[in-house]
Image: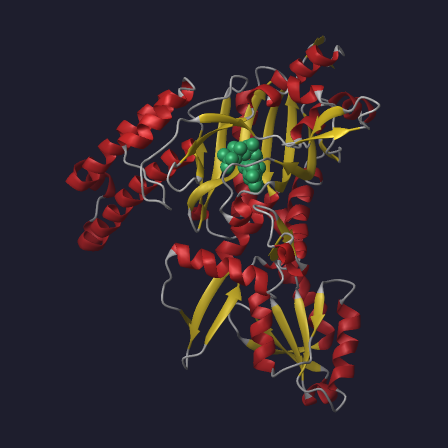
Amino acid sequence: MCIFAPIMTQDELFKVLVAHCKEYGFIFPSSEIYDGLAAVYDYGQMGVELKNNIKQYWWNAMTRLNENIVGIDSCIFMHPRIWEASGHVGAFNDPLIDNKDSKKRYRADVLIEDYLGKIEEKINKEVEKGRRKFGDSFNEEQFRATNPNVLREKAKYDEVHNRFVKAEQESNFQEYRQIIIDCGIVCPISGTCNWTDVRQFNLMFSTSMGSTADGSNTIYLRPETAQGIFVNYLNVQKTGRMKIPFGIAQIGKAFRNEIVARQFIFRMREFEQMEMQFFIKPGTELDWFAKWKEQRMKWHVNLGMGAENYRFHDHEKLAHYANAATDIEFQFPFGFKELEGIHSRTNFDLGNHQKFSGKKIEYFDPEENKAYTPYVIETSIGVDRMVLAVLSNSFKEEQLEGGDTRVVLSIPAPLAPVKAAVLPLVKKDGLPEKAQEIMKDLKYCFNCQYEEKDSIGKRYRRQDAIGTPFCITVDHETLNDNCVTVRDRDTMQQQRVPIASLRQMIQDKVDMNNLLKNLD
Ligand code: ATP
């Protein structure tokens, strides 16, 4: 039985989480001994396991559960014309604004979105107050429609929101600045409203390929993995004899020179994406869009991190090539933010590559007896944001009976970096040897850790802190009865289990196939 420790503010929780990630080998600032490199992070011994498990869950859900989805692995370097065709050279910009006093740089759209988020938060708090006050007789709809505080905040929200959407649609950056000033949005560092004009900033990193003497070429580090899929569409369709509808999935690094990168691994300059482009017959895109929205939400909720922590946010401003777009937002410690994007991209990408490369990119549909450029539904999720979602959702500081506390990561068991720890109670009397025997048996099936240092209580805490679902303790009795004590991470309940049943017991809980079966 455990009670939650005094509630920390979300800000405090986030700081504690970042420190925890470093202390337990999940995530380190890059180049730390040289004082780090902004918005670049390395994954440590625990982080890489978690990340690999997330990738495996995504990859298998895409390519194994769908016979018509195959994977590729394309290069980071691509022909520079690709980024002209995709529109990234001309229009992959963020609107930036500087505070003249602090000299800090912000994304103008994010400042406004955060302001709107705070109003939303205020409204929700007001509603919660009402719920507490009126108890069972509380009617939320009526409360939202009549409470003067809610109505006042809602009117403020609507006014700013409407201006923002209009400014977005018209790419009116002067108006972005005006909204920021009219709303009194101040720089969190200087506390002033002394803003520069809003400027556009291209997010692509460039480098050069070939020696200067040969005439070097400017090339880009890819800002998304999707284009590697589009330019391989013909290769995969032909060699895989793929019939529409079909999808191509890819996991890989992407690079963006983000203006503001202050949210740990939420916004990095080097990150990883898991993208799937689903090629379909023109005219069927809205049906497929709805299907992929549903599928992707199911994939997330299936992890058991609370359906209430996800929501869709449909885009009000659509890119000129898209005819539907939504984000799956997750409740991060700093509020609901984009975790994944789902976009109906029409035939914009394939059509443009056809134009720029001069190669025909079409599909001959035997059922329709005609050729067309396929339409595309894209699902695109950041691996690192997913890692952050899992870590922030599972991090708990608990107060135990007797005044003790523990930090536990209740990571969904199939994603946990280490599945079981094997712990001899003492470092003598043949217990380490027995524990090593168990290790030998389990290590081919699961990532296990053997630990013999420190008291058993300390070892339990260390395993809780990295999210290990099972601790297996070998004691003197084990030598007689071939049974061990298995402690469950979440309930802390202990039970005596025959060594022969360990493998099955762990498998039942950590098997990723159980997750996948729920999706099928
Ligand atoms: P944002 O609005 O937060 O900048 P975006 O709309 O530009 O994100 P997309 O281009 O749709 O993002 O990229 C797809 C996914 O890639 C995002 O949902 C996110 O999970 C991930 N992603 C994008 N940029 C970053 C980044 N700088 N760091 C980490 N993950 C990112």
**To which quarter of the image does residue 190 belong?**
top left
The colour scheme is secondary structure
Res. 347 visible in picture: no
Vertical placement of residue 25 versus 41, above or below: below
Q: Is residue 115 above or below residue 217?
A: below
Whole-percent x, y for residue 242 in the image: 76, 25
Say which quadrant the C terminus sits in: top right
Q: Nearer the viewer, residue 407 or 413?
A: 407
Quadrant where the image shows the N terminus: bottom left
Q: Quadrant of ligand 1?
A: top right
Q: Is residue 506 left or right of residue 324?
A: right
Instruction: Tell which of 373 and 161 is nearer to you.
Output: 161
The answer to whether 437 appears left or right of 404 in the picture is: right
The residue nearer to you, when weighing 75 against 449, is 75
Q: Is residue 464 above or below residue 98?
A: below
| Residue 29 x %, y % | 60, 54
The residue at the point 68 percent across, 36 percent down is 66
